[in-house]
Amino acid sequence: MLVVRIDLTELLRKIGEEADIDEEERVSFPEDGLVLTKPVSVKLHLVNTGESVLLDGTLQAVAELECSRCLKKIEYPISIEVSEEYSKAPPPSEARRGKGIELKEEDFVYPIGADNTLDLGEIIRQNLLLALPLKPLCSKGCSGPE
Ligand SMILES: [Zn+2]
């Protein structure tokens, strides 16, 4: 699988540093049942807040899915907002787990690796998988195999 790395070295140098990513990535994740027919449009904004790196923006992709009734292949456009937080420090969730404080989803912070990079492919994979419909249909009135 293609791994697309975002190098954060420059961004991490100074608090308040910002970076923009505007790219098309040709990725596919067949092992997850996620086949993309076009390059994924990645538009992300990153900012170093000092405590963490905030990432937000949009992902646009077209997934090839199978209609859950007639099994015809369909193209399913996906356009989603992404908002994540990354930190060099150990995630706060780790520290809180021991104290019995309940975790909220917004508390989840991804760690930044020792090499100061983020795996853009993984960000794309996780967010697109969440956006896939459970039962895709080729049309609203699909009544199954002809
Ligand atoms: Zn169908």
Image: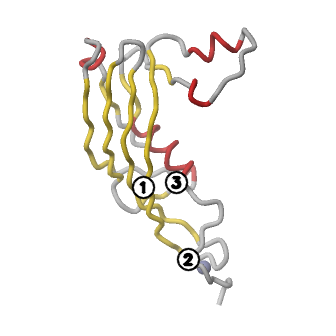
Name the residue: 65% across, 60% down.
Answer: 134
Query: Which image quarter has ligand 1?
Result: bottom right
- In the image, is residue 81 above or below residue 87? below
In front: mark 1 or mark 3? 1
Front-lying residue, 98 or 146? 98
- Compared across the picture, whether 119 is left or right of 138 comes to left
Look at mark 1 in the image and give the residue it sits on: 79
Going from N to C along the chain, the mark reached first, 3 or 2, is 3
- Looking at the rendered structure, which numbered label has been put on residue 68? none
Q: Quadrant of the C terminus?
A: bottom right
Label 2 residue SS:
loop
Asked if the residue at label 2 sits under 8 Å from ligand 1, the reply is yes
- In the image, is residue 102 above or below residue 132? above
Look at mark 2 in the image and give the residue it sits on: 138
Look at mark 3 in the image and give the residue it sits on: 30
Name the residue: 25% across, 43% down.
Answer: 22
- Compared across the picture, whether 113 is left or right of 19 comes to right
Q: Amino acid at mark 1?
A: Ser
Distance CA(mark 3)–CA(mark 2): 20 Å
Distance CA(mark 1)–CA(mark 3): 19 Å
Name the residue: 38% across, 36% down.
Answer: 56
Distance CA(mark 1)–CA(mark 2): 18 Å
Q: Position of residue 61 (x, y in %)?
A: 40, 56
- In the image, is residue 57 above or below residue 141? above
Q: Residues within 10 Å of mark 2 (few under 14, many from 20)?
A: many
Q: Amino acid at mark 3?
A: Pro
